[in-house]
Image (cartoon, rainbow, N blue to C red):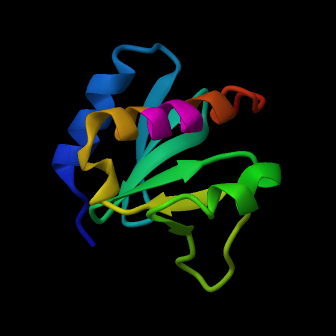
Amino acid sequence: MAYDESLAARIRDHLGDDPALTEKKMFGGIAFMIAGNMAVGVHGDDLMVRSSPEDHDVILTRPGVRQFDMTGRPMRGWVVVESALIADDDILSGWIDEGIEFARTLAPK
């Protein structure tokens, strides 16, 4: 599956030139990693966001959010935000910041 290059470019623009940032193709899309830990990614035209497993159930109650599940074994702390919702730059920025904030809590890889 191809991923939305335009969305990936919007994420890059938001992240700027953070020296801890790397990109890696995965899940049929692209992931943005902070110190080796995935923070956000693009799958198709949707945004993948990594967050605290403890906050997972609350995050799933937000509009336009669903469980990330490609294998039939969903993981807590991984969600997908539908493309229609992230068309708004402020909403996209909030989700990116949330993913980055959580990734920074993890030990570097």
Q: Is residue 97 magenta?
A: yes
Q: Residue furthest left?
A: 6
Location of residue 46 with respect to 5 vertically, above or below: below
Q: In which quadrant will I find the C terminus?
A: top right
Location of residue 23 (image quadrant): top left
**Depicted 96 relative to depicted 54: above or below:** above
Camera-nearest residue between 31 and 82? 82
**As rendered, which of 79 and 5 lies closer to the eye?**
79
Q: Position of residue 62 (x, y in %)?
A: 56, 58
Q: Looking at the picture, how far across and down is residue 84, in whole percent?
A: 27, 60
* Relative side of 103 to 14, left or right: right
Would you say residue 78 sits in the magenta stretch?
Answer: no
Residue 37 lies left or right of residue 1; in this view the side is right
Residues in magenta, as a range: 94-99
**Which residue of the protein is positioned furthest toward the bottom in this rendering?**
72
Q: Residue at x 71, y 57 (%)?
A: 58
> Against 65, is 109 above or below?
above
Q: Is 28 above or below relative to 12?
A: below
Question: What residue lies at 75% left-to-right and 32% top-to-bottom?
Answer: 106
Q: Is residue 20 left or right of residue 44?
A: right
